[in-house]
Image: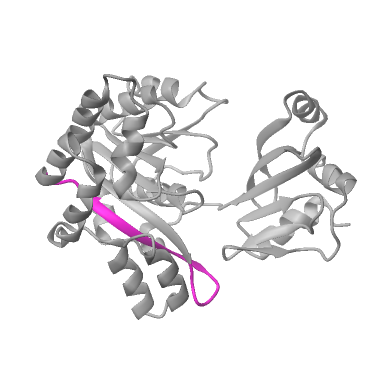
Amino acid sequence: MINRKQLLEYANTHQATDIHICAGTPLLARIAGELVPITKEVLSAEQSRQLTLDLLTDEQQKQFERELDYDLMLADQFGRYRINIGYFNGTVGATIRILPTRPMTMDELLLPAIVKDLAQRRKGLVLITGSTSQGKTTTMAAMIDHINADSKKHVITIEDPIEYVHTNKSGVVRQREVGRDTKSFYMGLRAALRQDPNVIAVGEMRDYETIKIALTAAETGVLVLSTLHVISIDKILERLVSYAPAGDESQLRYLLAESLQGIIHQELLPTANGQRRVACEILVVTGAARNIIRRKGGFFLRSIIETGKQHGMVTMTESVNTLLADKVITEAVAKNVLANYT
């Protein structure tokens, strides 16, 4: 049976993004977006438990047994890993996310030029959106790296967990991990406002208080970067407003209209050569967009993007069709993605 060292070494040498330890299936690796078996044999419940618990210290095992779920970061000679351990139908299993050793650059990600422009805004809010595992954190790390390399700015990040480790370049990047360095996104964000920031990067907007203070910070002279789980830009207003208590929707819309600078919405697509590539839809907030945010639904933002090429805006259809024309992705992939944008 494969051991912990062999498992993590396999993940790195095969460029896996995730490893799944699950009773009743072989060991699985996500490679180029697909789950691929690592072993021929199916894991028994005992084998799944043993391999999973081998990732924990004795004290961590005790805490896991008390709480039934456990998250941790792990680093070894091969790399860094974010690990979630839990019970699944009475058996113990784990999901291991393999973390890159350094942030990728925006040039490496082949992001549109407007993303660099948004990263250099002096103040306001820039959101990176998409569904789960679409590369949002990778894009935010690339934006932070660009700011760090290009500007003498103080960047504070609040993350859960820290996935990309930044080293100081022209600027200074100070990273805080929720649960280790601060108790919550809200408390870390509130403290960051007293720490002379130029840029605050919030790993994820998860509650109304965090959203409200982030918008306030953005309005008062700080550039705020954050991610948000949402399936399309059309749904962004609906999603944010859903966090607001009754009676606060108008205030949230006002703050959002005043502070939002842009939205980068991502789809991470499998390429024809077995890699992955970002396709993105980009909204740059103009006066017309601000009026829509104040008064109307997110559906109307679609027309702003479609007519905003002179401002650097990009539709998902344009992004995907460019990748298709360049033979980066297949027609089947393009058709599957664009079915959600018609």
Residue 277 in magenta stretch: yes
- Find residue 55 and report its horizontal and vertical position in percent: 77, 41
Q: Which of 229 and 96 is in front in this view?
A: 229
Residue 273 higher or lower than 276, as above or below: below
Who's the residue at 28% across and 33% down the image? 198
| Segment colored magenta | 270-286
Q: Residue pushed farthest left?
A: 287
Instruction: Tell me the colour scheme of the image.
Output: one colour
Question: What's the residue at 64%, 46% (across, down)?
Answer: 81
Above or below for 33 versus 130: below
Do we see residue 221 in this rendering?
no
Q: Residue at x 11, y 45 (%)?
A: 288
Let me know if residue 69 is in the magenta part.
no
Q: Identify the image quadrant of the N terminus.
A: bottom right
Q: Residue 249 in the image: x percent, y percent?
A: 26, 26
- Pick whichever, 46 or 99, lies toward us: 46
Residue 319 lies, in percent from the top left, at 32, 67
